[in-house]
Image: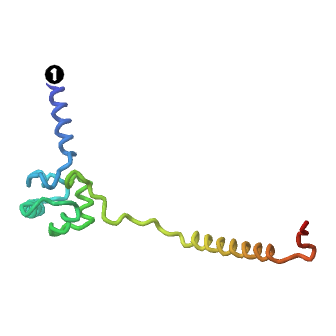
C-alpha cells in the first residue's frame, strides 16, 4: 500500500514538472521552475507584469529585457505559455526554392508557348486545297 501511495505521489510530482506555466499567473518560484528562466529573468517578468498582463508573445518579448525570439521558443518548449498559447516563432521558415526546378518550369513554359504559337499560325494559314464553303 505504501508503495502505491509513493508511486502516485511520484507521478503527481512528475506531471507537475511538465505542466504549463502561464506567464500572467505564475509566481517567481513557478517561473524559476521553467528551464532556462533564472531568478533575474523571473523578477523582470513579474516587474513588467505589474504594469499590466502580457497580451501575447510579441508583447512579452518587447517588454522583458534579454528575451528575444529564440529565447521565447526555448521557454515555450520548456512549458511557458502566455494566455495558454505556446510560442512557435513570428516568421516560420519559408520553403526553400529549388532554382533548378524553377528553371525547368520556365523552360517548359517557354517551349509550350512556342508550340502554341506554331499551332495557331498553322491554323490561321489557309491551305491551297481549302475552298470557301458554297452557299445554297
**For this rendering, which residue is in front, 5 or 44?**
44
Expressed as whole percent of the image width and height from the top left, the position of residue 135 reads: 89, 68
Would you say residue 130 is visible in this rendering?
no
Say left or right for 81 vs 115.
Answer: left
Determine the secondary structure under disc 1. loop
Expressed as whole percent of the image width and height from the top left, the position of residue 113 reads: 68, 74
Say left or right for 60 vs 125.
Answer: left
Say left or right for 88 vs 97.
Answer: left
Residue, x 22% and y 61% (percent of image)?
57
Q: Residue furthest top?
A: 1
Q: Residue furthest front?
A: 136
Would you say residue 126 is visible in this rendering?
yes
For disc 1, the marked residue is: 1
Q: Quadrant of residue 32?
A: bottom left
Expressed as whole percent of the image width and height from the top left, the position of residue 125 reads: 82, 77
Q: Quadrant of the N terminus?
A: top left
**For this rendering, which residue is in front, 57 or 113?**
113
Residue, x 62% and y 71% (percent of image)?
104
Expressed as whole percent of the image width and height from the top left, the position of residue 87 reads: 27, 58
Q: Is residue 85 above or below residue 47?
A: above
Residue, x 75% and y 74% (percent of image)?
120
Amino acid at each position: 500500500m505504501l508503495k502505491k501511495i509513493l508511486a502516485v505521489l511520484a507521478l503527481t510530482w512528475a506531471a507537475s514538472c511538465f505542466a504549463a506555466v502561464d506567464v500572467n499567473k505564475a509566481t517567481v518560484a513557478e517561473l524559476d521552475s521553467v528551464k532556462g528562466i533564472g531568478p533575474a529573468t523571473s523578477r523582470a517578468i513579474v516587474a513588467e507584469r505589474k504594469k499590466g498582463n502580457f497580451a501575447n508573445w510579441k508583447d512579452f518579448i518587447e517588454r522583458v529585457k534579454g528575451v528575444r525570439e529564440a529565447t521565447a521558443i526555448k521557454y515555450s518548449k520548456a512549458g511557458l505559455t502566455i494566455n495558454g498559447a505556446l510560442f512557435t516563432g513570428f516568421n516560420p521558415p519559408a520553403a526553400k526554392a529549388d532554382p533548378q526546378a524553377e528553371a525547368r518550369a520556365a523552360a517548359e513554359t517557354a517551349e509550350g508557348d512556342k508550340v502554341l504559337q506554331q499551332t495557331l499560325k498553322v491554323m490561321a494559314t489557309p491551305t491551297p486545297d481549302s475552298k470557301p464553303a458554297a452557299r445554297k
